[in-house]
Image (spheres, grey):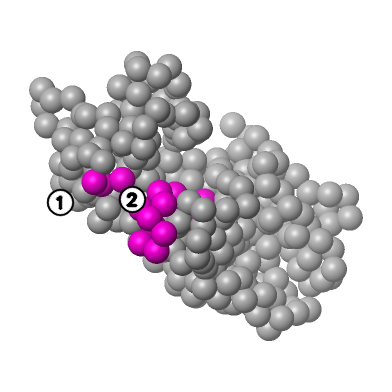
Amino acid sequence: MRDYSGQVEKIRTVLEEADAVIIGAGAGMSASAGFSYSGERFQKYFYDYEQKYGFHDMYSGGFYPFKSMEEFWAYWSRYIYINRYMDVPKPVYERLFELVKDKDYFAITTNVDHCFQKAGFDKHRLFYTQGDYGLFQCNRPCHENTYDNESMVKEMLKAQGYEIGADGALCMPEGRAPKMAVPSELVPRCPKCGEPMSMNLRADNTFVEDEGWHNAAERYSEFFRRHDGMRILYLELGIGANTPVIIKYPFWRMTAENPQAAYVCINLGEAYAPENIRKRSICIDSDIGEILYKL
């Protein structure tokens, strides 16, 4: 394994000297924390779907054309619960919070798993740009409200035969197999028009940007205005090439525009900076959690 001790020491210094820290987190951050969408974790909760439908990871299942809404919501209730309401396997987000909690920080993320808040981050210093597994919206949508879904999701899981432990773990009693459909009366419907609900996820132009979304966007913009020209650390964690226009490219541009700014990128398999900011950048191609625990 490559020795990153020199870069780690530089990050530690930049973090200490920064007037503000702006965190940008993507899928690689949650992957480092143990949120895998395939392999053992997929097998544990979706082995029956793999056997019946032939897909081998949660993402693929999310696009499967189920024949009924009852089947669709049986799948998605499991998906939502284990990725939104269960604890993250590894305390990577908690470690990040320990590093920045005494700094003036703000976090923007394309992740929809709510891991920042569960780790202790102030919700008024967070901007979830792509939605939240924990929210439903009208599928059309006929209005711009979103709805907390925890109680509805739990009812769907119980209808499939699952039990939820005191620690929040999802369990199937020994000797039983989960049902692969929920009762029709548990299919969530819009309280205004009666159409089916959907997840509040930015998949197409039906995504609802509700009042909370706009308030978070404004707080994010205000954070930039308050720290204009100051020593800002742009800390990018786990951002790949899927949605670079949301975090990566703006971080590069704002680092270039502010001579006092520094850019740090930690991402396994994809960590780099453009030539115009390279002298003020620290890029580490490694597991995010391993590096954070060295800081």
Q: Is residue 176 above or below residue 285?
A: above
Q: Nearer the viewer, residue 226 or 96?
A: 226
Of the 4 image quadrants, the one containing the C terminus is bottom right
**SS of the residue under disc 1:** loop
Of the 4 image quadrants, the one containing the N terminus is top right
Of badges 2 and 1, nearer the viewer stands 2
The alpha-carbon separation of the residues under discs 2 and 1 comes to: 26 Å
Which of disc 1 and disc 2 is earlier in sequence? 1
Q: Nearer the viewer, residue 243 or 268?
A: 243
Q: Nearer the viewer, residue 5 or 60?
A: 60
**SS of the residue under disc 2:** loop
Say left or right for 71 vs 144. Answer: left
Residue at image location 62% in from the left, 58% down from the top:
24
Q: Is residue 280 above or below residue 69?
A: below
Say left or right for 109 vs 182. Answer: right
Q: Is residue 35 magenta?
A: no
The range drawn in magenta is 185-201
Q: Position of residue 81 (x, y in %)?
A: 32, 46
Q: Position of residue 21 (x, y in %)?
A: 62, 69
Instruction: Give the amino acid at mark 1.
Output: Ala
The residue identified by callout 2 is: 188
Residue at image location 27% in from the left, 53% down from the top:
152
The residue identified by callout 1 is: 166
Instruction: Give the amino acid at mark 2.
Output: Pro
